[in-house]
Image (cartoon, rainbow, N blue to C red):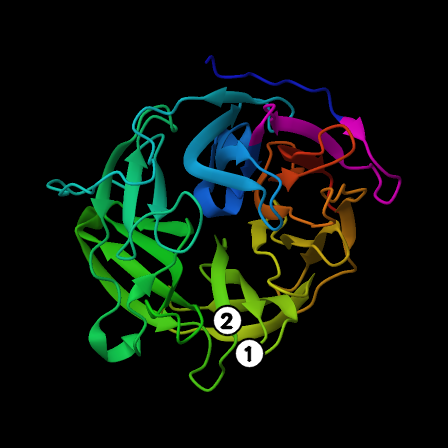
């Protein structure tokens, strides 16, 4: 079967923003359920002119919850115009479920031109082993090498019984052989919830150092799927998916670090993501230094964004990026998991999965929008 290439002119949705968000189809295929860009990753180059996003596909089966059946496949799509149009690619060597890890004999140059790295771990469709693996590209995602086993990230002392890595892809390059890795972990028996952490890959990925848990020990909320920005002033800011301990309320919290991830402090809540299991955030820095966070709320059936002018301490009113979601015939709502990048013109493009009246079985969508002025 040939890989589909989908191009759609951008179209306005609602006058809620000025100018209104513009939407494009990244991937849609009859009989296929595509989802979870945040579980795979997004990488961009040339100031956001070119980007590649990953997502997971499987056969569409109406079953309640996630309408997808195994086997799962990891897919890639590329834009070379900032998110206006997209083409699906094979991505030679890109991780597929069940692929065994191989040794990493030579350290990776994380500053190499065209560098991209995807982390694969336990706990989600299209994922990998609980010890974690990663794949690497140096040609902007056209070909990939690996998977390589993650070095042991969580030594016994700070682990606290969490021996299963559930990280998605969230990294920041610190040097040629040094990479910040943000992730999460839980016990294999799931007796404790996921807890977000910061770690550092060194020696080009052959060694690792656990840095810190983000959430204080006394708190028992589920925290995972951080989305991190290395700011121009040298600080780190991350937005983290949170589910209330012992409850169903979910939200996004922001944390910051001034020492390259060794210690973290909470900045506060970014926004609510509904009940049951919530939705992960996507964080980006604007050209003027402001931060933007996008997130879905399945309770309100909308995709939102908020902007912060003070490094994540406070956030402006929510901007509706997408509404008019189409629940499935059983009434279930399943969308979101965004990734986001800044374009050369300063606008932002967020990629996520969605369903509407025209494509009720779901598709991967991209929304480009202009953040509000200061």
Left or right: 230 as drawn, with respect to 49: left
Q: CA distance from mark 2 to mark 1?
A: 7 Å
- Residue at the (46%, 42%) spot, across then down: 41
**Is residue 330 in view?**
yes
Q: Is residue 6 magenta?
A: no
Q: Nearer the viewer, residue 272 or 79?
A: 272
- Residue 295 placed where, x, y %? 65, 53
Residue farthest toward the top in the current orientation of the protein: 2
Upstream in the sequence, badge 2 or badge 1?
2
Question: In the image, residue 249 lies at what x, y percent?
Answer: 66, 71
Q: Is residue 17 magenta?
A: yes
Residue at point 31% right, 79% down? 160
Percent across and percent down for residue 255 are: 52, 69
Residue 97 quadrant: top left
> Which element type, helix, strand or loop, lies under badge 2?
strand
Q: Residue furthest left?
A: 105
Left or right, 176 with respect to 355, comes to left
Viewed as shown, does residue 49 lie left or right of 40? right
Q: Which residues are magenta?
A: 11-32
Quarter-of-image position of residue 100:
top left
Tag 2 near tag 1, CB within 8 Å: yes
Which residue is at 45% across, 30% downward?
A: 75
Which residue corresponds to mark 1? Answer: 245
Q: Residue at x 44, y 51 (%)?
A: 124
Rendered view: 37 above or below 92: below
Residue 222 is tagged as 2
Q: Position of residue 94 (x, y in %)?
A: 34, 32
Local crowd at mark 1 within 10 Å, few (<14), some, or many (≥20)?
some
Secondary structure under badge 1? loop
Left or right? Give the position of 215 relative to 86.
left
> Most extreme residue toward the right, as rendered?
15
């Amino acid at each position: 079967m040939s890989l589909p290439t989908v191009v759609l002119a951008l179209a306005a949705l609602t006058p809620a923003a000025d100018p209104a968000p513009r939407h494009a189809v990244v991937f849609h295929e009859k009989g296929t359920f595509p989802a979870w860009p945040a579980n795979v990753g997004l990488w961009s180059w040339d100031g956001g002119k070119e980007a590649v996003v990953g997502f997971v596909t499987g056969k569409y089966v109406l079953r309640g919850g996630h309408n997808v059946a195994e086997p799962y496949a990891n897919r890639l799509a590329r834009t070379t115009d900032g998110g206006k149009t997209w083409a699906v690619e094979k991505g030679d060597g890109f991780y597929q479920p069940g692929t065994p890890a191989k040794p990493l004999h030579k350290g990776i140059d994380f500053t190499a031109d065209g560098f991209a790295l995807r982390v694969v771990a336990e706990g989600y469709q299209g994922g990998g082993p609980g010890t974690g693996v990663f794949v690497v590209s140096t040609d902007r995602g056209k070909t990939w090498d690996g998977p390589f086993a993650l070095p042991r990230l969580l030594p016994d002392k700070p682990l606290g019984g969490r021996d299963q890595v559930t990280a998605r892809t969230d990294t920041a390059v610190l040097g040629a052989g040094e990479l910040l890795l943000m992730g999460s972990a839980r016990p294999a028996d799931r007796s404790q919830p996921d807890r977000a952490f910061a770690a550092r890959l060194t020696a080009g990925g052959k060694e690792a150092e656990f840095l810190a848990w983000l959430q204080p020990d006394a708190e028992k909320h589920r925290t995972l799927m951080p989305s991190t920005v290395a700011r121009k002033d040298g600080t780190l800011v991350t937005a983290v998916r949170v589910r209330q301990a012992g409850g169903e309320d979910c939200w996004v919290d922001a944390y910051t670090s001034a020492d390259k991830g060794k210690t973290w402090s909470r900045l506060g809540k970014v926004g609510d993501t509904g009940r049951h299991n919530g939705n992960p955030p996507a964080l980006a820095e604007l050209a003027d230094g402001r931060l933007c966070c996008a997130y879905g709320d399945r309770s309100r059936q909308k995709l939102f964004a908020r902007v912060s002018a003070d490094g994540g301490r406070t956030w402006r009113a929510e901007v509706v990026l997408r509404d008019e979601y189409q629940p499935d015939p059983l009434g279930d709502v399943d969308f979101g998991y965004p990734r986001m990048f800044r374009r050369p013109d300063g606008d932002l493009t967020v990629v996520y999965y969605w369903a509407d009246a025209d494509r009720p079985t779901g598709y991967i969508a991209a929304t480009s929008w202009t953040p509000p002025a200061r």
